[in-house]
Image (tube, grey):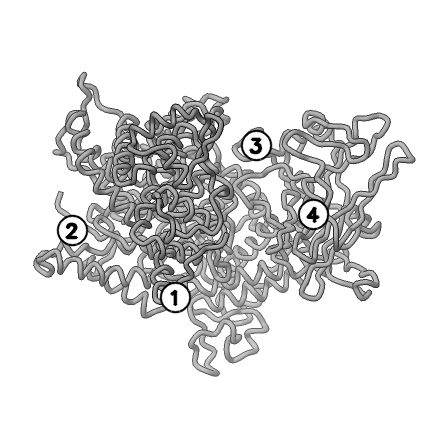
Amino acid sequence: MNYRKKLIEVALPLEAINKESAREKSIRHGHPSTLHLWWARRPLAACRAVLFASLVDDPSSHPDKFPTEEAQEKERKRLFQIIENLVKWDNVNNQQVLDAAKTEILKSTDNNPPPVYDPFCGGGSIPLEAQRLGLEAHGSDLNPVAVLITKALIEIPPKFKDRPPVNPEAQQKLIPPAPLHKGGAAGGGIWYGAQGLAEDVRYYGKWMRDKAEKRIGHLYPKVKLPTEYGGGEATAIAWLWARTVQCPNPACGAKMPLVRSFALSTKKGKEAWVEPAINRDSVPHIVSFEVKTGKGKAPDGTVSRKGAVCICCGKPVAFDYIRSEGKAGRMSAQLMAIVAEGNRSRLYLASTEEHIEIADSAQPEWKPDTDLPEQALGFRVQGYGMTKHADLFTSRQLVALTTFSDLVSEAREKIILNAVAAGMPDDSLPLCEGGTGATGYADAVATYLAFVISKIAEASSTICTWSSSPKNELVVSTFRRQAIPMTWDFAEANIFGISSGSVVNIMQFIAKVVIDFPDLKKGIVKQSDATAVMIGAASSLISTDPPYYDNIVSADFSDFLYVWLGRSLDKRFPNVISTLLTPKAQELVATPYRFGGNKQKAKEFFEEGLGKAFARMRETANPEYPLTVYYAFKQTETEDDEDENQVNSAIASTGWETMLEGLIKAGFSINGTWPMRTERGSRTIASGTNALASSIVLVCRPRPETAPSATRRQFLNELKRELPDALHTLQQGNIAPVDLAQASIGPGMAIYSRYSQVLEADGTPMRVRTALQLINQTLDEYLSEQEGEFDADTRWALTWFEQNQYKEGLYGDAETLSKAKNTSVSGLVTGGILTAKGGKVRLLRRDELPENWNPATDNRTSDWEATQYLIRTLDQKGESGTAALLAQLGNRGEVARDLAYRLYNICDRKGWTSEAIGYNSLVISWSEIIRLAVEQQQQPVQMTLDF
């Protein structure tokens, strides 16, 4: 098949893309992720780069223009510079940067670029970035929440492009409000793009907030300040509650508080905590709470992984008892403390009867009586009697959410009247039927206002907790991770306050997203099953982020938001919001609980569905452009998850196998994989774990019908010949060790999938799982062969570490191994990496290494020693301190990085997660360490590092 090779099939400036993708997770103002929650949203920077590189020709496709490798490389560097500018968040609305990218796209597509289609559009990142690049964007998803999000991103704004706002406040002015005005002529009243839409979202959102405060503001009272805080009143930020059950000890009978932590603030010098006060003179015993500040520390929480303990009588209480009390409806909550807004600080105050009575007085007229799933990945609350969506909220939260939900409909009617008064024609045609008059516009604004309610729900449930961190004393939202866990002490935010979960802040975030919508080209979004015929997206460039086997069950999670979106938007989107809860039966996930616990049926359902989806993509895709598929799933897994030490690195993950099998059976070849660093290392799911930090972007082309078959021996020979070079290139690009196994799939599967089939010795086709195992084996061999680069002491330490880690072993065994490695135990002790006493030897841990180490005066510095010191310095002094050490180590630094890959590989196979993190972190930071080291070499270097 003849086609022009695209840039993504040859080379990418990965470091620049990954840097901006990782940075993007910390961006809040104006970022589309703040419009509405979605799980595992792909970074815009990565999507933008992938789309650009999928459309733009690689210079090797034009030998007439670039006849030599040098000329081609020069042209690639020019294209790389465009990508490096394009992926920066500061340039998302830089017209000069965007025009340069669009010019290249038009040049490579003969001025006729294809539409872009994402059949699993989720949070809308891919179609949004297609639109930013001036392309027609299409998206579809089975999940109605995903459809609404993507409609709000790419479909609604173009319909109302360049229109002025209709609210009375704006109508009275000749020019747009200064914060939203971008380039309009002074006094001309010119509104560009989605500025008018954003202004109306802000105005009517504020109108809703003001109306709601008049109706239910009494439920969110001010806090009376004691004299030590100057008296007067302050705005509450949050009310902190503890769940309670009755102590099973009849001599006690207290409403025992179930508390994870009594800490309120751990900021140095401003510590605050809750101190339980117990009255044991009565039965049942009575618990009250005081707030303490200053010297001292918070008492231990009453709940651990083993169960709870009654704070009054000390009786251990099993979770089974707590669950039974919850299911019987006997779990309640007690107010522990109130957080108030001080002068640039948080004030922590004791609870009062007034605030308790006001909270208890809230009586919702409506609540979502829909069922939580009986069991689902990430759900932990059902066993405690919380079986309805309404059970996840306090009565006051339900009153607030229903009040705001009702106000969306009221605001919509008001918008219609104001739009007509402003001169907008009204054909009474709703947005869902293509209306762009006053009624359609009111539906559009109401959609963004409905997002306010679902964001309030996320920030205002009993799953929210209080963070006492010195950096962030705030309410942590419901979905701080992809789960609805059981929370014991929870934080109830004041939605009329000024904190991050308040309506004012939510409204500002949404308005800032709307105003920064991109070029506003045509966008079309449909609710559709990806296995169905893809209508309206023929001859598209397809780029997509399909479901990850059983990692995230978005339908179960999104019900939490859908119940409020459905009530708020009512009949605005009848074809999207047409069911009580989100569709589950067709959702492409391999979750056994959907199949009566049958893992095989779940696996078959996912495989069949994903295969059909890829077949549809093959039918729909424009053959001139590669298909790109994002995937983030750990590539190896153990046979027995309960035994972390039983590890076989050659076992392939079911998720990866299914993904690749589906692509290959649909007739695609996998031509490459690019590791995109799409997550921050600090994200909750990765904290303290060895979680993946990258998505792998698979680059696929239709496999020629005439592709030959190959034998197992041919496949293995090609694998051993081609894979090492690819792995070396990945390492040179500082791919994280945690992602190396995933990234190696690309070049390995490129060999496997170039053939119609690979035949085993008995003539049967080789399974994808077998191919993955062989790829992993080749990776292990490659990393093992690198040991020849290391010095003798390091080779000994590697073998000993793999057998014993930091545990003691027999001196005789160590001595035997040392002879084989051409070193000695005494030399290893002298080298500072080993201790030998009483017939036992043990590798020194990093925290045991000598202080004030100076490589310049160390006569026996091994690669092992240098690597361990680099990791310890990175942990204690950061990248700058590590750069200073690297500058002293000279050429030994590169070897240390290679050793980190090898050590990570060992730890990963052994299940030594905490030890693996250090090696992974060193490689991730390597580029920055190198840069700082070069800078520091221009300056005088202190030759001794004090730890």
Asked if the residue under mark 3 is in contact with the one under mark 1, i.e. CB atoms within 8 Å, the reply is no
Q: Residue furthest top?
A: 762
Q: Nearer the viewer, mark 2 or mark 4?
A: 4
Dot 4, how many residues are within 10 Å of its Cα: few (below 14), some (14-19), or many (20+)? many
Element type where label 3 sits in the image: loop
User: Which of the marked residues, 1 or 3, is nearer the chain's N terminus?
Assistant: 3
Q: Secondary structure at mark 1?
A: loop
Residue type at the position of mark 3:
Pro
- Dot 2 falls on a residue whose secondary structure is loop
Circle 2: residue type: Arg
Placement of 164 over or under 395, stated as above or below: below
Q: Which residue is mark 1?
A: 940
Compare marks 2 and 4 and give the one earlier in the sequence.
Answer: 2
The residue that disc 4 covers is 263
Instruction: Give amino acid for label 4.
Output: Ala
Q: Which residue is mark 2?
A: 4
Callout 4: helix, strand or loop?
Answer: strand
Q: Position of residue 839 (x, y in %)?
A: 46, 25
Q: Which mark is drawn over residue 373?
A: 3
